[in-house]
Amino acid sequence: MVPAQEKQQRVYLNGTWVTTGEEIGVVDPSTGQVFAHVAAVKRDHVQAALAGAYDALARWRALTAKERGAALDRVADELLKRADEIARTITLENGKPLAQSRGEVAMSEDHLRWFAAEGRRAYGRLIPHQAQGRRNLVVRTPIGVVGAISPWNFPLVLAVRKVAPALAAGCTVVLKPSSQTPLCAVALAECMEAAGIPPGVFQLVIGSARMIAEEFLNNPICRKITFTGSTEVGRELIRGAAETVKPLSLELGGLAPLLVFEDCDMDRAVEQTLIAKFRNTGQSCIAANRIYVQRSIHREFLARFLAGAQKLRVGPGLEPGVEIGPLISADALKSALDQIEDAAAHGGKVLCGGKRAGSTGYFLEPTVIEGAGESALCMREETFAPVAPISTFETEEEAIERANASEFGLSAYAMTRDVGRIFRLAEQIEAGTLGINDGAPTTSTSPFGGVKQSGWGRELGSEGLDAFLETKHVSIGGV
Ligand code: NAP
């Protein structure tokens, strides 16, 4: 067994572990201290990775979907074998409570198994012919070499959400994880190697995001970029892709509204709202950002939600029973504190929390704010922290209007038992995912993605595979 520290010095290029002469320190957000280092690539490493991915492409795409699926299942097996250790790694570099890291590993395993099977259903079609003697076929082919860029907030599962469908479709992949959380991507590369994924089919580059993205954008070998991260960086990629018309899948920021209606099951509404807001310490792209409660039940909901928030245990993610870990960085903590101050300046009353917790690491007390105006930052900009602003509405029409009054549209939530209302919301809410009485609506089997400035395209479900397939029409004459 190679000592952990030594392993972390390397990146995985063309089937070998490489040191580069440069490194990045990885910080434990519960202490603010660097606890590991990883090798950082230079441009020639990225070029070599793309060239290797291209060399590996022909053989990988020539395998049957069943063979590729079996390989992905072996990666899932490797992940499962190391689930505890990888979950600890996620908690160390990201800060989230260990139970949630375990959940992330389990979901990553499930994504791998879903796409291992889904690859076998990349159907083309035979179209009833239009002219005598002709036949029209539709064939799906892998798009080619893929550059994948993933964020720190779900560092393993959001990388797997790209890599698994790309490999299942017959593409080869170069993954660039966030430099804040590269260690679980190193573990994923180790699982790929142990599972016998051929050299070049999956590679890992860690380092300057701008340089790596530039290479993905401008190198003709890279045929597609799939990105999860902020809308700001998404815009930069769109600008960069204009020159080469490079296809992009973009999973960007959100500002999820959560609507609580007077006909809800109150116990479930409180429980699911706590999950939608505080899971992952509020650092989820689908976190409930703005909570709107129908006026007739506002007092009761608020009292019960507040009691739930005050019970949440804050601490280092490795401590048993912790439900709220640290924020990812000092900047993230400052930005959350700024939003709280701004909410107070916009009429909001801080009912609990509102302050940094402890003096080491980047902990914030779970915070509930009542009545901040719609112009407050927390109602307009992604919060990415355990801060819950709650305000009221009178009618369904008003709730829908306020929910849709944003340039973002990743996810939305509603707590209601009225079937007619559920259909009206499903048709009118502008979001890629709608959780009805469900604070954690993501599953391997269903499409996930955003509308408006929350992104382009879908991951997961059968749509997740489409992102890595070309659709080709073959017209056959003289039949
Ligand atoms: P970010 O700053 O946009 O970073 C995301 C990834 O992009 C990281 O790997 C980062 O690398 C890289 N990056 C940074 N600057 C870049 C550039 N100029 N060109 C190309 N890549 C660049 O976002 P984040 O702070 O990590 O993640 C939080 C954001 O992601 C939130 O807005 C959240 O809503 C969004 N998100 C969306 C989804 C979704 O599915 N829609 C899921 C999760 C998160 P470095 O870390 O090395 O800088």
Image (cartoon, grey):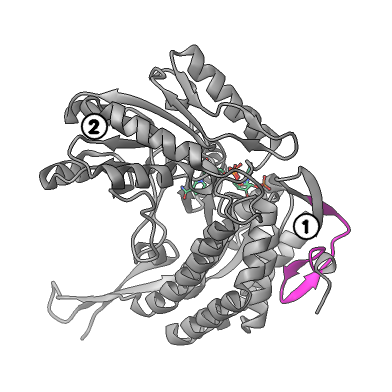
Query: Does any portion of residue 291 appear in the rendered image?
Result: no
Q: In this view, does 265 lie above or below 371?
A: below
Q: Name the residue under label 1.
A: 41
**Between marks 2 and 1, how big is the CA–CA gap?**
47 Å
Q: Which residue is drawn at 66% across and 62% down?
A: 88
Q: Mark 2 points at which residue?
A: 400
Residue 75 in magenta stretch = no
Which quarter of the image is occupied by the C terminus?
A: bottom left
Whole-percent x, y for residue 116 in the image: 45, 77
Q: Position of residue 412 (x, y in %)?
A: 33, 42
Residue 411 lies left or right of residue 49; in this view the side is left
For residue 63, say whether it is visible.
Answer: yes
Task: Say which quarter of the image contains residue 276.
Answer: top left
Quadrant of ligand 1 in image: top right
Left or right of 318? Residue 265 is left
- Say what amino acid the circle numbered 2 marks: Ile
Q: What stretch is highlighted in magenta?
A: 7-25
For the N terminus, the image quarter is bottom right
Amino acid beneath label 1: Val
Q: Please tell me which of labels 2 and 1 falls first in the chain.
A: 1
Say whether residue 131 is left or right of residue 278.
left
- The reply to whether the residue tagged 1 has its Cβ within 8 angstroms of ligand 1 is no
